[in-house]
Image (cartoon, rainbow, N blue to C red):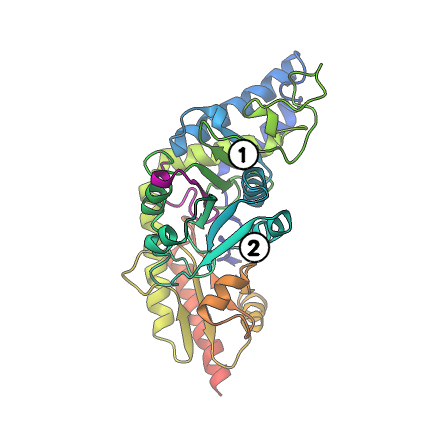
Amino acid sequence: MIYLDNAATSFRKPESVYAAVDHALRRCSGNPGRSGHKVSMLANEIVRKTRLLCASFFNAESSEQIIFCSNATDALNLAIKGMLGPGDHAVTTSMEHNSVARPLEAMKKNGVDITKVESSSVYGTDPESIRKSLKKNTRLVVVTHISNVTGTVNDITEIGRICRERGTAFLVDAAQSAGAMPIDVREMNIDLLAFPGHKSLLGPQGTGGLYVRKGIRLSHLKEGGTGRSSESLIQPDSMPEGYESGTVNVPGIAGLGAGISFIDETGIDKIQEKEETAVRSILDGLSSIKNVTVYGPPAGHPRGAVISFNIRGMAPQDVAVLLDAAYGIAVRGGLHCAPDAHATIGTLSSGGTVRVSPNYFTDENEIESFIIAVEEIAVDADE
């Protein structure tokens, strides 16, 4: 199989990730923070070290500011619902994933006012449009770093600066950027950062986290055992345990730590450079094929490793099925859980796009095979 669906989840992982998960399951399957025996202590050490790795990776103030979650969606729900309440106002964009759009929509029932700023699929969200949308009661601005449909990159640093000046909390959805490009939460003025472990961080599914800047407090979405303050029936406010009720995913967290270590050792700049080369090759190849339309930033513009295209006269889902069944190439066809983004680029009513997303492990031969396959499908469609 040629796997080009890394925007959904990375399929090929470093060998160290597989080894870390296996070791945690076989040797360290105690319940961290719940017991004093050796196996529990080993599990706790895995969680502690990975939390430190996450904090260092994003330049957080301390490891206590990292809350482990089951994925980026879980983290976004905690941030959005933990921040907003009746009478609050939030600002977001027209290019967001449903993991942002749906929680915000749900918060309308709680008396939260939502403003969606129009965003460009080529240039991203104009920071000034965010500034103009801020109100006295704006409590939260939520923006994706990289679009999961078009790969469009937003100017997170400038948007964060505007939010910081106004005293408005800034939440970044880093589903497509964490591990693919450098993120410094302090330098980029990020108050809350939601990240998945299973995409560009190269960890297992069922992992992710939320960075919360010191001084920001969230309402709890769940209560339960935290391993501390067990005598109280009130959920503790301590970070991060107060937001991690129940047993955390120790094997997954071990794999996440191994993925981050691989990125640190390889160099995120090297990873980003290789992915940019892959994107250029795909864009160049698709642009030369008749009846193919590519969406998002053109070659030469900043973009993540996400490319959407369509073949005239064919439904995107049919193209994806053909690539899989006839060529052994895995891509994704459809709306990619982002109807607002497809409405923005004009593909909502036609069923979305075909999305191709390479990563660090994608090689040129795989890209060449993909381009040849798309060309053959496009020729057949034309006939």
Please give left or right for residue 278 compared with residue 227 in the image: left
Which sits in the foreground, 84 or 362? 84
Q: Residue at x 40, y 45 (%)?
A: 180
Residue at the far bottom in the pictured view:
383
Count of numbered circles on the image = 2
Q: Residue at x 43, y 75 (%)?
A: 375
The image shows residue 216, relative to residue 206, as above or below, that is above
Residue that badge 2 annotates = 98
Which sits in the foreground, 150 or 354? 150
- First of labels 1, 2 by sequence position: 2
- Is the Cβ of the residue at disc 1 closer than 8 Å to that at disc 2? no
Residue 108 part of the magenta segment: no
Image coordinates for residue 153, horizontal then vertical, percent? 37, 54
Please give left or right for residue 222 compared with residue 238 in the image: right
Image coordinates for residue 117, horizontal then vertical, percent? 43, 58
Image coordinates for residue 317, horizontal then vertical, percent? 57, 70
Residue 174 part of the magenta segment: yes
Residue that badge 1 annotates = 255
For the residues labelled 1 and 2, the Cα–Cα distance comes to: 27 Å
Q: Give the residue type at disc 1.
A: Gly
Mark 2: which secondary structure? helix
Query: Which of the 4 image quarters holds residue 267?
Result: top left
Please give left or right for residue 314 compared with residue 35 in the image: left
Rate crowding at label 1 as few (under 14), some (14 to 19) or many (20 or more) other CA atoms within 10 Å. many
Which sits in the foreground, 365 or 3? 3
Residues in magenta? 164-184
Mark 1: which secondary structure? helix
Q: Give the residue type at disc 2.
A: Asn
Chief secondary structure of the magenta portion: loop
Query: Can residue 72 be seen here?
Result: yes
Image coordinates for residue 7, horizontal then vertical, percent? 49, 53
Rate crowding at label 2 as few (under 14), some (14 to 19) or many (20 or more) other CA atoms within 10 Å. some
